Amino acid sequence: MAWYDLFASFYDLMLDGVYRRHRAQAATALQLVPGMTVVDVGCGTGASFDALVAAVGPTGRVIGIDASAGMLRKAARRAQRNGWDNIELVEIKVDDPEATKQTLRTLGEVDRVLCFLSLSVIEGWAAVLTEWFRRMTPRGRLVIADVHNAKPGLYGRYVQVVSQATLTRKSWEPLEAMASDFELAWQPSSWMLGGQLFIAAGSR
Ligand SMILES: C[S@@+](CC[C@H](N)C(=O)[O-])C[C@H]1O[C@@H](n2cnc3c(N)ncnc32)[C@H](O)[C@@H]1O
């Protein structure tokens, strides 16, 4: 996580404005209700927290999980700055099954899961997606927002290096196979993203 610890210092400066609209769309796709518990897998600096906190309200919980201490420090500062006291941050590698099992034991019920730009980065992404999908409450809902590029060119490969992502992953496919309902919406995407942004949603 050394790269993301370093990236944390300029991540928001580079990207905060770029995905704002998509974060609101992803929160809508989660179908959040006040009082729910939502987990943000690979939450980074907490750039999605704003939309999540607004939707779950003061009685809900937002749990941000990330492997990078640097990114989580930024997320904690964001929560403090905004006076959000219903944010919990957990530092684990989500593709470490033992760490995930322990975290799940202490979390309580999880109604919703968001994976925003994280499944393209997390090494064991498919198992992570399956595990969190299965651990949600009945009728739980999981949303993926990520960038896909079947054949990254020079700029796409640059984005992959900077974000440590694999843009060729079709991370919506396991969700499509598991969900009782499934929606995939391709979003108009600026060339700056290095591929096309999609929002995929599915319920248990
Ligand atoms: C591109 S950033 C996305 C951050 C945030 N979700 C956002 O929308 O801005 C990817 C994040 O995934 C985290 N990450 C990568 N591998 C991980 C792992 N195995 N477990 C937990 N977090 C991981 C990184 O530390 C980083 O914060």
Image (cartoon, rainbow, N blue to C red):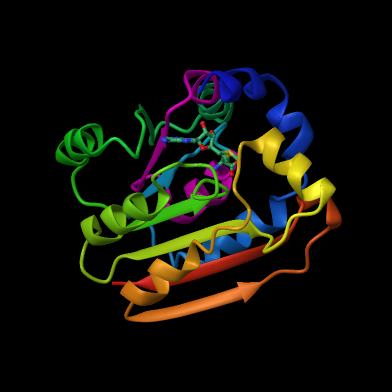
Can you give x and y, in whole percent of width and height, for residue 35 in the image? 33, 54
Q: Quadrant of residue 25?
A: bottom right
Specify whether 146 is left or right of 1. right
At x 36%, y 32%, the residue is 93
Q: Is residue 90 above or below residue 147?
A: above
Q: In the displayed image of the protein, which residue is found farthest to the bottom?
A: 181
At x 69%, y 30%, the residue is 11
Can you give x and y, in whole percent of width and height, for residue 199 in the image? 58, 66
Q: Quadrant of residue 65?
A: top left
Specify whether 69 is left or right of 15. left
Can you give x and y, in whole percent of width and height, for residue 23 in the image? 62, 54
Say if the magenta span includes residue 50: yes
Say if the magenta span includes residue 112: no
At x 70%, y 50%, the residue is 20
Q: Is residue 32 above or below residue 92?
A: below
Q: How many marks?
A: 0
At x 56%, y 51%, the residue is 51
Residue nearer the viewer, 60 or 139: 139
Residue nearer the viewer, 124 or 60: 124
Residue nearer the viewer, 44 or 54: 44
Q: Is residue 188 above or below residue 16?
A: below
Q: Quadrant of residue 33?
A: bottom left
Q: Is residue 13 visible?
A: yes
Residue nearer the viewer, 26 or 189: 189
Q: Is residue 35 visible?
A: no
Specify whether 184 is left or right of 143. right
What quarter of the picture does the C terminus occupy? bottom left
Can you give x and y, in whole percent of width and height, for residue 27 in the image? 53, 59
Magenta part of the chain: 47-73
